[in-house]
Amino acid sequence: MSESLESQLKELIVERLFLDIAPEEIETDAPLSDYGVDSFLLLELIVALEEVFEVKFEQSDITADVLKSVASLAALVKSKK
């Protein structure tokens, strides 16, 4: 894939969570909560990540720190590949 994992995650976040912003407006290290992403949306996102990146997350993988930003999500996905 030519696109970076971070770019793919930003597009996925905007597309799946119906955010009213452009993917490139999401700062990689900014808390997702800054964009209105709440715990309900994070659950949606986890399902989407498993589907799109063909990874499986354990309950123990899903922590507040991991779900904090695009950068932390990218690290999680990479760790599962």
Image: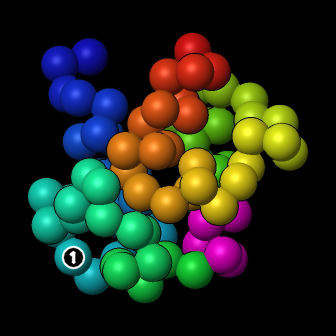
Work out which residue is located at the far right of the displayed protein and give it: 59
| Residue at 43%, 36% in the rendered image | 74
Which residue is denoted by mark 1 in the rendering? 21
Q: Residues within 10 Å of mark 1 (few under 14, many from 20)?
A: few
Quadrant housing the N terminus = top left
Q: Which residues are magenta?
A: 39-44
Q: Nearer the viewer, residue 8 or 6?
A: 6
State the image coordinates of residue 28 (x, y, percent, origin top left). Answer: 26, 52
Q: Is residue 41 magenta?
A: yes
| Residue at 64%, 51% in the rendered image | 46
Image check: 60 left or right of 34?
Answer: right
State the image coordinates of residue 58 (x, y, percent, origin top left). Answer: 83, 36
Q: Is residue 11 magenta?
A: no
Label 1's element? loop
Residue 18 visible? The answer is no
The vertical placement of 50 against 69, above or below, is above
Query: What is the total number of numbered labels drawn onto the structure image?
Result: 1
The vertical placement of 27 against 1, above or below, is below
The vertical placement of 25 against 69, above or below, is below
Q: Quadrant of residue 9?
A: top left
Residue 7 visible? The answer is yes
| Residue at 61%, 65% in the rendered image | 42
